[in-house]
Amino acid sequence: MLELPDDLRGAFKEPFGPVFTDAERLLDDASRPLVAVGDVVTAHLYAADFAPDVALIDGHTERERIDDDVARHLPDPDIEVANPPATLSRELLDALCDALDRDAPTVIGVDGEEDLAALPAILATPRGGSVVYGQPGEGMVLVSVTESSQERARDLLERMTGDTDAALARLDAR
């Protein structure tokens, strides 16, 4: 559905919010619903006895297979979707929106890569909620879902190639 052009890759270097290295401190500042994007982030939250409302995992961190220490904290996925690297597939967007509508924590297993899922997560999560994603080499980024964070996510998503109108319509329909 959407693909990340090479000239947009640098736009993701600046975190969308504060960076935490301690899951319990992050959770003190987070609100519900909470969406976790990434295996290490999700493992840290589960290790702190917190199940995010939605988690997206792909079995990798920084393009390497996750180690056993991370894997032991991850639950099995409830839903499996395909999402090739540097893309946002319709299947991933649909699963994310559907998971946010469920009354139980939902883990989405991604065959491919979940790295860009923070953008649609910020757009699909109701304002007042939180999205957490990993910042390589730094920690966990906590995004408070606000009008401002959604505008920034929308701007980046609109700059991707593909059917941005259909993607935004699906996310806005939530």
Image (tube, rainbow, N blue to C red):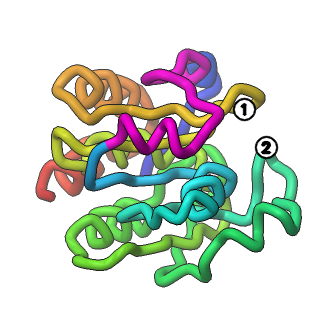
Q: Where is residue 162 in the image (x, y as percent from the top left)?
A: 41, 43
Q: Name the residue under label 2.
A: 62
- From the viewer's perspective, is residue 6 above or below residue 161? above
Q: Considering the numbered disc 1 on the image, is that residue within a helix, a strand or a loop?
A: loop
Image point 50% across, 36% down: which residue?
A: 25
Say which amino acid is labelled 2: Glu
Occupied quadrant, residue 137: top right
Q: Position of residue 116 (x, y in %)?
A: 53, 43
Q: Mark 1 points at which residue?
A: 136
Measured Cα–Cα span from mark 2 to mark 1? 7 Å
Tell me the quarter of the image containing the C terminus: bottom left
Whether residue 166 appears in this view of the structure is no
Q: Where is residue 165 in the image (x, y as percent from the top left)?
A: 23, 43
- From the viewer's perspective, is residue 65 above or below residue 17? below
Q: Do the residues labelled 2 and 1 touch (CB within 8 Å)?
A: yes
The magenta stretch spans which residues? Answer: 11-30
Q: Is 121 left or right of 70, judged from the image as shown?
A: left
Q: How many marks?
A: 2
Q: If you read the primary sequence from the N terminus, does the residue marked by circle 2 or circle 1 appear first?
A: 2
Say which amino acid is labelled 1: Pro
Q: Is 99 left or right of 141, judged from the image as shown?
A: left
Occupied quadrant, residue 102: bottom left
- In the rendered image, residue 174 lying in the magenta stretch gets the answer no
Tell me the quarter of the image containing the N terminus: bottom left
Image point 37% across, 35% down: which residue?
A: 29
Along the line of sight, which residue is nearer the eye, 98 or 55?
Answer: 55
Q: Is 49 left or right of 44, judged from the image as shown?
A: left
Image point 32% across, 67% down: which residue?
A: 94
Image point 55% across, 25% down: which residue?
A: 19
